Image (cartoon, grey):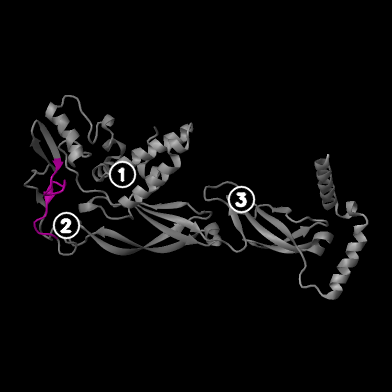
């Protein structure tokens, strides 16, 4: 089974709540369950992958271990977390196993958890099509946790420092004898930190971090599209007790445009033309992101025809050739006709009705096909 990031497997962020994780898993489980996809090996693999991810992220202890050590922190075969090591005593081995069950697993034997890296954050940024294509510099305001400047992130009152936990002696874990087995647990006094704070900082109340809204300047490269993400390293939430901050991911969402639709590097637009222009041909102006251009409409143009304007599309943020603008013409039926205009159209219709095959070949051939179809039903 592939070892993709568990958060990616479930389609949630690293800051997702337990409810969001459960909801995401239920959705994937219903979609890929083997009973609903019998014989589909790919769905079976995705179901197992989602189940494995949920079993880890739904468990607070395992999730914490995974956030710190990745797959090694929760895979017993990789030597981390609740894994077995060569040469361990009988009590050590079962202490690790039952420690996982009773709340101490996922941290390794006898090791304290230490301060955790800050959480990654996501910011949804809306752009117009013009802004996404041209690129721009934007300022965003992000609510986040930042390191407390009063205590420099230690959580302790200025002039003091955290002290070694007297319960676990700084190990972050305690061992309890339960009959024949030794059970290892996270230290209840320091919660696995290995240190305690006697005099907490008055500004952050011992947390080491404070809530703050910060303003960031983000350079949006030209050619971005919906779903593209820009990573700002170290601009996420501050870590605990001076640990590194997480990252901020700016996710781009391009608003719908009233004229253009983007597909990869190409732009599409619909151009209405009159009945007369379609029949006789003509020239009209069409918009592009660079300004107006002339579009020649040949005589006898049918509705739905596509005209390609080379290099009038988009250059992707990933490089490559510039796309095209494809204009789809729609022949507009005249409305609000006067009596005289209707008379003229009737005269025109009479002039072409005697030779429909010549003037309206598509309609003529279609009606011939319908006639043949009904005759075949009679036979």
Residue, far left = 166
Specify whether residue 89 is in view.
no
Camera-side mark, 3 or 2: 2
Indicate whether residue 115 is drawn in magenta.
no
* Image location (x, y in percent) of residue 173: 13, 41
Residue matched to label 1: 57
Category of crowding for the residue at label 3, using alpha-carbon neighbours closer than 10 angstroms: few (below 14), some (14–19), many (at least 20): some
Category of crowding for the residue at label 1, using alpha-carbon neighbours closer than 10 angstroms: few (below 14), some (14–19), many (at least 20): many
Residue matched to label 3: 322
Classify 193 as above or below 250.
above
Magenta stretch: dominant secondary structure: loop
The quarter of the rendered structure image containing the N terminus is top left
User: Which segment did they paint magenta?
Assistant: 185-200
Give the alpha-carbon distance from disc 1 to disc 3, as whole Å.
43 Å
Whether label 1 touches label 3, CB < 8 Å: no
Q: Secondary structure at mark 1?
A: helix
Residue, far top = 87
Residue at 28 percent across and 31 percent down: it is: 78
Along the polypeptide, which appears first: circle 1 or circle 2?
Answer: 1
Give the alpha-carbon distance from disc 1 to disc 2, as whole Å.
28 Å
Residue at 10 percent across and 57 percent down: it is: 160
Along the polypeptide, which appears first: circle 3 or circle 2?
Answer: 2
Residue matched to label 2: 155
Classify 333 as above or below 324.
below
Along the polypeptide, which appears first: circle 1 or circle 3?
Answer: 1
Q: Secondary structure at mark 2?
A: loop
Whether label 3 touches label 2, CB < 8 Å: no
Residue at 44 percent across and 60 percent down: it is: 125
Specify whether residue 101 is in view.
yes
Camera-side mark, 1 or 3: 1
* Image location (x, y in percent) of residue 273: 75, 63
């Amino acid at each position: 089974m592939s070892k993709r990031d568990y958060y990616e497997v479930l389609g949630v962020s690293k800051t997702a709540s337990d409810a969001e994780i459960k909801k995401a898993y239920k959705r994937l489980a219903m979609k890929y369950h083997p009973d609903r996809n019998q014989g589909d090996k790919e769905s079976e693999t995705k179901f197992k992958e989602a189940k494995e991810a949920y079993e880890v992220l739904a468990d607070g202890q395992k999730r914490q271990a995974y956030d710190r050590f990745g797959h090694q922190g929760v895979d017993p075969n990789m030597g981390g977390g609740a894994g077995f090591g060569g040469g361990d005593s009988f009590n050590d081995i079962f202490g690790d196993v039952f420690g996982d069950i009773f709340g101490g697993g996922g941290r390794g034997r006898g090791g304290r958890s230490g301060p955790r890296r800050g959480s990654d954050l996501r910011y949804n940024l809306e752009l117009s099509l013009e802004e996404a294509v041209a690129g721009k510099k934007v300022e965003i305001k992000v609510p986040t946790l930042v390191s407390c400047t009063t205590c420099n992130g230690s959580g302790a009152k200025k002039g003091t420092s955290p002290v070694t936990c007297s319960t676990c002696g700084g190990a972050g874990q305690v061992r309890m004898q339960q009959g024949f087995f030794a059970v290892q647990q996270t230290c209840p006094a320091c919660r696995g930190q290995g240190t305690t704070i006697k005099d907490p900082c008055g500004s952050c109340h011992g947390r080491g971090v404070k809530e703050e809204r910060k303003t960031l300047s983000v350079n949006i490269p030209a050619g971005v599209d919906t779903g593209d993400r820009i990573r700002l390293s170290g601009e996420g939430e501050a870590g605990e007790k001076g640990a590194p901050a997480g990252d901020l991911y700016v996710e781009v969402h391009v608003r719908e445009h009233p004229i253009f639709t983007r597909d990869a590097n190409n732009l599409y637009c619909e151009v209405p033309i009159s009945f007369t222009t379609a029949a006789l041909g003509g020239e009209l102006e069409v918009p592009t992101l660079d300004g107006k251009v002339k579009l020649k409409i040949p005589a006898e143009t049918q509705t739905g025809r596509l005209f390609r304007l080379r290099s009038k599309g988009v250059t992707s943020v990933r490089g490559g050739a510039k796309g095209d603008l494809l204009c789809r013409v729609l022949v507009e039926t005249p409305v609000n006709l006067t009596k005289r205009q209707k008379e003229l159209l009737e005269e025109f219709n009479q002039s072409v009705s005697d030779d429909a095959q010549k003037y309206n070949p598509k309609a003529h051939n279609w009606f011939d096909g319908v006639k043949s179809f009904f005759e075949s039903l009679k036979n």
